[in-house]
Amino acid sequence: MKTLIIYTTKYGCTEKAASILKSKMTGEVSVANIAREKAPSLEPFDNVILGGSIYVGKIQKALTKYIDNNLPVLLGKRVGLFICAGQPEPVCSKELEDSFPEELFKHAVVKEVFGHEYRLEKVSFIHKMILRKVAGVTESASALSEEKITSFAKVMEYYCTRSDFQIEDCKKISRFVGGLFY
């Protein structure tokens, strides 16, 4: 099984999450940051994982455009969805759901918010001011959840290795790996 992780990132958090996710998966896994490079053809991939970070409640436009342009093909693949976001629950779950077209969100076998990371050395002056004022962030901090990334990978892998696997099976096992289904 071949898997493609497609992501966009602004300051590197989603790139780090995609890298960790790749390391947790087996088989042939490719990674593409579509903000910097052209995405490979989806044809040779059985599984596609899409991820991005949230800024002011929205995912990056490059990812939204990519999804819109490839939605019919994506709906023919096994899909996983993730975001990196710093809002508390239930806000981040709503951001996850709102970041992807409803049809794709329902089609996805696994969805998760991996957490966030504030790397102030990479953030523009304006964004530093916004982070300080709105979120009270005054220093770099990481709240990426390796546990959530690992659980996401396990569910994706389990689903991807079973030809007879149905979404109902996915919902049954979700309680064992973190309840990643909505």
Image (cartoon, rainbow, N blue to C red):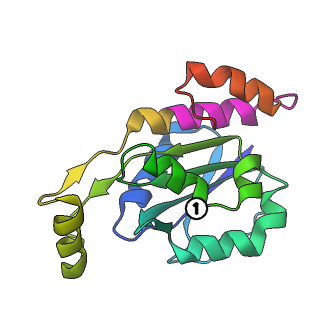
Q: Is any atom of residue 40 visible in this view?
A: no
Q: Which residues are magenta?
A: 151-165
Q: Residue at x 30, y 45 (%)?
A: 143
Q: Is any atom of residue 137 visible in this view?
A: yes
Q: Callout 1: few (<14), some (14-19), or many (20+) C-alpha neighbours within 10 Å? A: many
User: Which kind of residue does numbered mark 1 sit on?
Assistant: Ser
On screen, residue 84 above or below 171: below
The quadrant holding residue 89 is top left
Q: Quadrant of the N terminus?
A: top right
Q: Position of residue 46 (x, y in %)?
A: 78, 49
On screen, residue 105 above or below 173: below
Q: Residue at x 45, y 65 (%)?
A: 57
Q: Quadrant of the C terminus?
A: top right
Magenta stretch prevailing secondary structure: helix
Q: Residue at x 65, y 37 (%)?
A: 156
Left or right of residue 128: residue 98: right
Q: Residue at x 26, y 48 (%)?
A: 142
Pick the residue in front: 92 or 2. 92
Q: Which residue is mark 1?
A: 99
On screen, residue 109 above or below 161: below
Left or right of residue 69: residue 22: left
Count of marks, rendered view? 1
Q: Position of residue 39 (x, y in %)?
A: 64, 72
Q: Which element is circle 1 on?
A: loop
Q: Is residue 155 magenta?
A: yes
Q: Position of residue 42 (x, y in %)?
A: 76, 63
Q: Position of residue 43 (x, y in %)?
A: 81, 62
